[in-house]
Image (cartoon, rainbow, N blue to C red):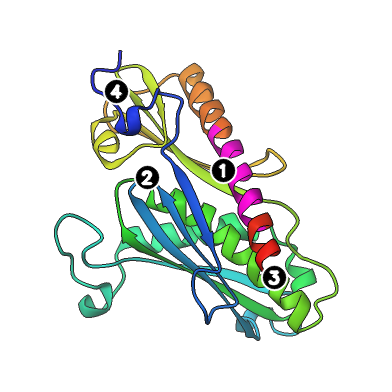
Amino acid sequence: MQTFERSYGRTPRDMRPVTIEPAYLKHPEGSALISFGDTRVLCTASVEPGVPRWLRGSGSGWVTAEYGMLPRSTNTRTDREAARGRQSGRSQEIQRLIGRSLRAAVDLNKLGEQTITLDCDVIQADGGTRTASVTGAWVALAIAIEWMQKASGLPASPLHTQVGAVSVGMLEGTPLLDLDYREDVACGVDFNVVMLGTGQLVEVQGTAEGEPFTREQMREIVDLGASGIERLFEVQRKTMKRWRESV
């Protein structure tokens, strides 16, 4: 039984308020500022000619990602990773997750030998930074691809579906959708679910940090995550419609 109130007066099956501001920056080919409650991530998509060496001559493009947190995105300052001289293992793991997730939605052969780099910078963290990054990066990517179609005559969109992600935890046997930081710390089971608009799963990351979970509980967690991602898809669609009407 849940023993404390959730932020925004939510029920266990509710997400935090989600907003996406498209084309947030002037210079990138695509950008978006996404908010999951108090978590805010600035996502940009940069288009560059050429591909990694191992793809040259293949006719295939590439989509990759980088992730970072600003020094005061949390309640105490952390050093910039550049100042330390290396990325943390956490940052590397998250940016690989973002890259894998977005590549699952792109036909790289239709992209041609071009690279799209997705930069996800956390400007304020309150749980769910990786899931917000995946969801916001899709909008930045979609805007960049439409820019490519107009600016460089890309004949067909390589983006074939949506991608969204959300966290789900279990607290005292109750599954909770879209964890903020306080809940993330308290939950004994913590999952991140990434899903395509086709309903296919790209990634399910699950850990029992407290008590182990059953297969039935895992199915319940994934189903709850999928229901939240469907809501994120609707936010993405409305965001893209609003952006198209403004340009």
Q: Callout 3: 10 Å neighbours few (<14), some, many (20+)?
A: many
Residue at numbered disc 2: 37
**Most foreground residue, 86 or 25:** 25
The residue singled out by tag 4 in the image is: 211
Q: Residues within 10 Å of mark 4 (few under 14, many from 20)?
A: some
Image position of 35 (left or right of 111): left
Between the C-alphas of marks 3 and 4, the distance is 44 Å
Residues at marks 3 and 2, CA–CA distance in whole angstroms: 28 Å
First along the sequence among labels 1 and 3: 3
Left or right of residue 247, residue 78 in this image: left
Contact flag, marks 1 and 3 (Cβ < 8 Å): no
Image quadrant in which the C terminus is located: bottom right
Classify 10 Å Cα crowding around label 2: few (below 14), some (14-19), many (20 and above). Answer: many
- Helix, strand or loop at disc 4? loop
Q: Nearer the viewer, mark 4 or mark 1?
A: 1
Q: Amino acid at mark 2?
A: Gly
| Residue extending furthest toward the left | 76
Disc with the residue nearer the chain's start (3 vs 4):
3
What amino acid type should be assigned to the residue bearing mark 3? Ile
Q: Are the residues at dot 3 and dot 2 in contact (C-beta closer than 8 Å)?
A: no
Q: Rounded to the nearest whole Å, what is the CA distance between mark 2 and mark 4?
A: 28 Å
Q: How many marks?
A: 4
Q: Which residue is mark 3?
A: 145
Magenta-colored span: 228-240
Q: Secondary structure at mark 1?
A: helix
Q: Earlier in the sequence, mark 2 or mark 4?
A: 2
Q: Position of residue 29 (x, y in %)?
A: 60, 77
Q: Which residue is mark 1?
A: 232
Q: Is 57 above or below relative to 133?
A: below
Residue at (38, 52) in percent of width and height: 129
